[in-house]
Image (cartoon, grey):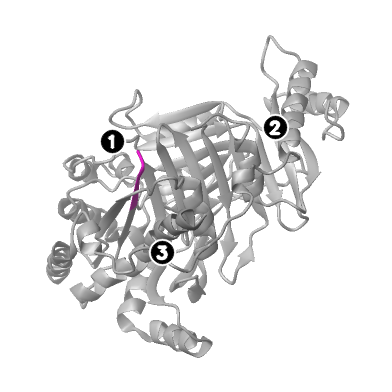
């Protein structure tokens, strides 16, 4: 057995007796990792897996380049949940997810105070809103389903590697099932020990030779890109969207809406989706960085700046509305001037306040009355290529509501739809003839311990059958300029396109 496992077998037996109503006991091993990174650990684990093995890597770098404490890595889930028109289950994906997760009752170890020791990791596409808002359903169903992928996919992992950036260590965590009639706890514990020992050996093995370095080139292929030709909508039609929505604002139907368009390019030869992730984490570090491999040619690479909804161990519901964008300045003085200009822009301020109010209303649907608060209002957060206006809204989850109720209440984000949310979605779906798929949906996890943490699927590349798709929108209000709004979407899409270009350039130079 691996040494220094916690808890010991004797302690595990005592915990099982003390928590007879629980059926899942975490077992873990601390490993020094001062010479490793989440990327190197992921690559080491994957060299022992077959091609296309389902897996994930979740990281976070907050504004100001502060690395969040934990990164999470998992391979080979024990189960995958899918839902959608082409799946066996075609109903509300959160009903399916809640039913599955209800079967796991975790013994919480005070010394293992992690937000996730295992659970469900995956996505819920924008199109799933048809289950949460029935009046939007017919508009979604009238759109063309270009991707033909599940509406939601959640991979269930009972074994994860948790990278601790504060102590430069990692924990290998797995779980013993306490409700398996054919296996006693000693047998479960021995199997858990074997899993941990195997992963420890993989982590201590050399890095795959082909992955030992990563050169990030400042040069790109084809600097003059024809975004108009790459778009599924095109500049003229997108500006037509803006004009149409502005008329709806004049007519009093909505206050704001967020139309989008999508670019797609073939993934260059010899470039992998994980290559894209490695580039993205360098050129566009963000609070929510993720690489998810669902197998069958479907992978998701993202660097999202925006939380959709989080519910922590204390049942605090949290969301971070983002609205208002500017390029980063070339000098500190220009950067500061652009930040001041952004905060002084009446159009941007009006749009942001509208979305903060929408966030407050959404949180209020599941929060204890009087507990909803705006903890930060209109702060500037700076990223590698752009800066945004960001606010923080929190509330205490009501005792008669679940994390899945909170998920539905916030889904999809008002920053990706507009206000009023339902009417804005109906209009957007009527204009956008193709379903959004993952764009504007969510990526994240639900832990065995009941923590929900999800990002909005923006600044995201969906790779499907060797094609890379990225999508962006802009918030349309009464005085929006169609050309300026289209250009804002191109600014947002630029980071994803540069990621593909730089990977191609790197492969040429290697």
Q: Residue 87: give x, y in percent of width and height.
A: 33, 26
Q: Element under label 3?
A: helix
Query: Distance of mark 2 from mark 3, alpha carbons?
Result: 36 Å
Question: In this view of the protein, can residue 395 be seen by the observer?
Answer: no
Residue density around tag 3, few if under 14, some if 14–19, many if 20 or more, within 10 Å: many
Check the image and report above or below for 399 versus 385.
Answer: above
> Which disc is residue 443 wearing?
none
Residue lying at 50% horizontally and 73% vertically, measured from the top left? 381
Query: Residue under circle 3?
Result: 495
> Which disc is residue 148 wearing?
1
Given residues 225 and 419, the one toward you in this image is 225
Q: Is residue 466 magenta?
A: yes
Check the image and report above or below for 297 versus 358.
Answer: above
Mark before the other along the chain sequence, 2 or 3 = 2
Q: Given this view, does label 2 or label 3 mark the residue nearer the observer?
A: 3
Q: Quadrant of the N terminus?
A: top right
Mark before the other along the chain sequence, 2 or 1 = 1
Left or right: 489 with respect to 120?
A: left
Q: Element under label 2?
A: strand
- The stretch of residues the image draws in magenta is 465-469
Query: Residue under circle 2?
Result: 174
Q: Is residue 331 magenta?
A: no
Given residues 135 and 90, the one toward you in this image is 90
Residue lying at 30% horizontally and 71% vertically, measured from the top left? 488
Q: Residue 43: give x, y in percent of width and height.
A: 61, 43
Mark before the other along the chain sequence, 1 or 3 = 1
């Amino acid at each position: 057995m691996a040494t220094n496992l916690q808890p010991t077998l004797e302690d595990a037996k005592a915990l099982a007796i003390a928590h007879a109503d629980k059926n899942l006991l975490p077992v873990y091993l601390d490993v020094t990792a001062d010479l490793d990174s989440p990327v190197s650990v992921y690559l080491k684990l994957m060299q022992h897996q077959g091609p296309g093995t389902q897996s994930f890597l979740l990281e976070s770098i907050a504004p100001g380049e502060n690395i969040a404490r934990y990164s999470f890595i998992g391979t080979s889930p024990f189960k995958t949940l899918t839902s959608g028109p082409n799946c066996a289950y075609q109903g509300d994906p959160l009903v399916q997810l809640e039913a599955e997760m209800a079967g796991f009752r975790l013994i919480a170890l005070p010394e293992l105070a992690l937000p996730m020791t295992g659970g469900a990791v995956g996505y819920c596409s924008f199109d799933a809103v048809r289950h949460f808002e029935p009046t939007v359903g017919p508009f979604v169903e009238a759109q063309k389903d270009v991707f033909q992928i599940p509406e939601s996919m959640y991979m269930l992992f009972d074994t994860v590697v948790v990278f601790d950036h504060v102590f430069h260590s990692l924990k290998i965590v797995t779980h013993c099932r306490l409700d398996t009639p054919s296996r006693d706890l000693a047998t479960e514990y021995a199997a858990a020990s074997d899993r941990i020992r195997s992963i420890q050996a993989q982590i201590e093995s050399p890095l795959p030779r082909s992955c030992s370095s990563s050169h990030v080139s400042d040069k790109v292929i084809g600097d003059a890109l024809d975004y108009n030709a790459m778009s599924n909508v095109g500049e003229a039609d997108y500006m037509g969207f803006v004009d149409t929505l502005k008329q709806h604002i004049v007519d009093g139907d909505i206050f704001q809406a967020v139309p989008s368009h999508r670019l797609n390019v073939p993934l260059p030869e010899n470039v992998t989706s994980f290559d894209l992730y490695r580039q993205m984490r360098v050129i566009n570090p963000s609070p929510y960085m993720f690489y998810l491999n669902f197998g069958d040619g479907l992978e998701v690479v993202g660097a999202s700046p925006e939380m959709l909804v989080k519910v922590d161990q204390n049942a605090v519901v949290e969301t971070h509305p983002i609205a208002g964008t500017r390029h980063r300045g070339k000098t500190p003085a220009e950067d500061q001037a652009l930040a001041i200009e952004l905060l002084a822009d009446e159009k941007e301020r009006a749009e942001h306040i509208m979305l903060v109010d929408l966030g407050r209303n959404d949180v209020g649907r599941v929060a204890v009355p009087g507990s909803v608060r705006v903890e930060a209002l209109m702060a500037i957060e700076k990223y590698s290529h752009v800066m945004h206006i960001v606010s923080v809204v929190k509330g205490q989850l009501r005792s008669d509501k679940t994390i899945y109720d909170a998920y539905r209440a916030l889904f999809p984000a008002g920053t990706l739809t507009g206000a009023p949310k339902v009417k804005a979605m109906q209009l957007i779906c009527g204009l956008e003839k193709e379903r959004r798929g993952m764009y504007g949906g969510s990526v994240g996890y639900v832990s065995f311990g009941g923590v929900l943490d999800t990002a909005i699927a923006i600044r995201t590349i969906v790779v499907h059958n060797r094609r890379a798709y990225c999508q962006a929108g802009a918030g349309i209000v009464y005085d929006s300029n169609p050309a300026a709004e289209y250009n804002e979407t191109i600014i947002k899409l630029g980071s994803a396109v540069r990621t593909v270009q730089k990977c191609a350039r790197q492969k040429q130079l290697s």
